[in-house]
Structures are given as structure tokens and as C-alpha cells.
Image: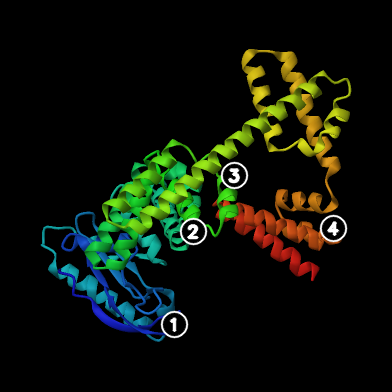
Amino acid sequence: MTSAPPQMAQVACPSCQTPIRVGVINFIDANEQPQLKNILVGGRLNSAQCTACGAPISLAAPLVYHDATKQFCFVHIPQQLMASAKGAEVERFVGSITGMLMQSLPAELPKGYLLSPRKFLTMQTLIEAVLEGDGITKEMMAAQRKRIDIISQLLEGMSISDAALLDALQANQADIDDEFKSTLAAFVDASAMSGDQEGMAQLAALQAKVTQFIGGDATIAYELLIEQLRTAPDDDAVRALMQTNQETIDYTFFDIFNAKILAAQDADDENTATTLSTLRARILALYEEIQANLEAAYTRAGQILDAVFASEDMTATLTAHLNELDEVFDILLDGQRTMAERAGDDAAVARLSEIIALTAQVKDAALTPDARAVRALLDSDSPTRYIRENIASITSGVIKQLNEISEEYTLKGKTEDADRVRRIAREAGAMLF
């Protein structure tokens, strides 16, 4: 029994109310039209995208799925149809389909399964039964759903900015494997086959970004930083970007930068080539300055550590150098302890561990009430609860510091962290004012 061509139904987009025509399929014969089966398991049956606002549109329609080879006769009738006046009509429709199947199947084939079709409350459970019939386990389906969810996250990030995409890629790095690439490639192919040129272009662009990311050269991070530097409003902004992204400014960074200059020259775009060359010279000068400052900072941190190590009152010595107990000092301390652990020097490990603990205590004691509240908010599993329970500690200074931290995260390209801190600042501000 051959599946009938889709009937066209006109519906209003639930988002913007634009009238949209959707092709409706009520019967699928898996053996005769496997392409319809692929559309079904891909979650794209009886659906469309609004041409005005892009919102997805799904039409609730009855479906009979038949696979004579596996002796499957599956039926899904949306609950809203069964509860309506059309319920009896839908039941008659299903009966007519199974009746025609009984007549059309060759006499030698079993037909008993058609007398009691398996009914499903949701389209998703029907799809899962179809996949299980193909040997795809629930665990495999869960893994596939996770891959599809990641694709959605990446597409959303890409629509916001390169920084948001990079955050999403890094957050899902462990799951971006060969199977993920295959799933993404299948989505690209499906979009091409369905004629969705815009969707195919977006997915293909994402595919290229993912390939860059898993290539091991962190190209996206370099590209993002170069663009941020290129569009920075002044030298101070360039310096701030370089200081907060020191780990990214390496040989590969300059190699990519040089490639951009050469590409502009090859394209006879002298304007861009000159702008990039000037920026590169400025970055190199600042890079050398930052490296010299960093070397001096580590030298000074080493001197302070030596003084603390030799001191009889380490707390007093640390307190005397409170303003110099910065990130460089913390990194040096941790590095020295790691080296002592590797060398098996237990006495040095114990001494350095004590200094690390005392450093934290000295810093904590010197915190202003505002800074202590900010740290508590950022460390809290529930900032909302902390704000409500400690409203007296929430001041305009706390909100100011939160906004400054959010801006710093934004400069570093840590979009998710910046958004989280910004949300906490807004919530704290709402409680305060």
C-alpha cells in the first residue's frame, strides 16, 4: 500500500500568527517510502518553520506507521484530537487504513498484527519504538538526544557571538567526538535534501567551526581574540585584552595574525593589510612590555616568598606584604609546592602548604565587607537565597564590584560567567533599590 502524498494544511504561527502551509502525512509504509521513515525519526514529520519569524511549527495529526517486514502497525492519535468532536472520525480513519493494509498485503504474509495496532500516547514514544525495532537501544537514543541538544546549544551560541560559541564548545568538549560529527553531518545533509537552504548554511557554518575546534589548534579562540583586538576602541582596551588573554598570545596567535595580513595583501585590500600591520606592531610592543612586567612580578613574588620562608612569624611577614599577595604570588606558591611534591621533599611541601593556608587567611582578614559579600555571592549555590538572608550586607559597592567582575569576564570572552555575574548584580540591585 503506497503512502499518499502529503495534504496541505494552513495554520497560524503560534509565535507571530503568520499563516503557514504545512504538509501533513497520516500514513507511512516504511518499506515503500523509507525517506518518510527518516523524516519521522528525525522529528521533522508534519512540521515546518515560520517564514516570518523562524519559529518551529508542529501540527498535531494522527499517524499510522506500518512495517510489514517487522510486523509493526503503530498508531499515534494526539490527545487533543481524541478529546474533540473529531475523535470518532479519527478512529474510523485508523480503521480504514488497517483495513486497506489487510487487503493489500499478499496472502502469504502474516496479518494478525494488523488487528491490534500498538497505540502510542505521544509521537516521541512511537519514534522510540521504531528505532528499537531497528536495534537502536534506549541508551543509544539518549546519547543521540544529547548530541542533538548540544547542536542546539552550539547554534544558539553561534547566533550570539564567537565568544558564546567558544564557551558552548568548551562546555561540551568531552562529547564532541566522531559520533557527534556524524550526527551534525547528517543534519547538514537532511537540511539540503529538504531544501532548507538557510538551515543548511547555518549547520554547515557550525560544522566548519566544530572542525576548527577539534583540530587541536584552538583556532576559534585565536580568531576571537584577533577580532576583539581589531575592534578595540583604544590602546588601553588593547592592553587590557592582552593582559587578560596572555595564555592565548603565543606563536600560533601571531602565525594566524600574519596569515590575515598576507590574505589581505593577496586580495589587494591595502587598507586592511595596513591596519592589521599597524596593530601587529603595537601588539608586539605591548607583548614585550607585558612579558617584562610579568618577569619582574615573578622576581618580586620570589623575593617575598623567600622572606616568608625564612620568617619566624610568617603571618606578620605576609601581612606586611598584603598588597603584593596577588595572582602571580599565588601561582608561584602553587608551582613551588608542586615541584616539592615531585621531588619528594615532604618538609618543603608542608611548609609551602602552611604558607598557602596563611596567605588565604591574611587575604580574607583584609577583605572589606563589600568584597566579602561579593565572594560569598559568587561562591553560593543560591545567590538569591544569600541575598534574601543577608540583605544588610548588599550595598551599592557590592553591585559595583559585581559589574566590574562581569566586565572583566566579558573581556576574557567568558560569556557565561559574565552573564551569571551580571544576573546576580541585577538581582542584588533590585533588592537594594
Q: Which mark is residue 243?
A: 3
Count of numbered marks: 4
Q: Which residue is mark 1?
A: 16
Instruction: In this rendered view, identify the residue nearer to me: 73 or 296.
Output: 296
- Neighbourhood count class around disc 2 (C-alpha, 10 Å): few under 14, some 14–19, many 20 upward: few
Instruction: In this rendered view, identify the residue nearer to me: 402 or 127.
Output: 402
Q: CA distance from mark 4 to mark 2?
A: 39 Å
Q: Are circles 3 and 2 on residues that touch, CB within 8 Å?
A: no
Mark 3 or mark 1: name the one nearer the start of the chain: 1
Identity of the amino acid at label 4? Ser
- Neighbourhood count class around disc 3 (C-alpha, 10 Å): few under 14, some 14–19, many 20 upward: some
3 or 1: mark nearer the eye: 3
Q: Position of residue 299 (x, y in %)?
A: 68, 27
Identity of the amino acid at label 3? Gln
Residue pictured at 23% horizontal, 76% vertical: 6
Q: Which residue is mark 2?
A: 231
Q: Which residue is mark 4?
A: 393
Mark 2 or mark 1: name the one nearer the start of the chain: 1
Q: CA distance from mark 3 to mark 1?
A: 46 Å
Identity of the amino acid at label 1? Cys
Mark 3 or mark 4: name the one nearer the start of the chain: 3
Residue 28 in sight in this render: yes
Q: CA distance from mark 3 to mark 2?
A: 16 Å
Q: Position of residue 419 (x, y in %)?
A: 61, 59
Residue pictured at 66% horizontal, 57% vertical: 421
Q: Position of residue 266 (x, y in %)?
A: 26, 51
Task: Judge from the rendering whether residue 303 lies leftward or rightward of residue 110; answer left or right.
Answer: right
Q: Position of residue 60 (x, y in %)?
A: 38, 75
Residue pictured at 29% horizontal, 57% vertical: 188
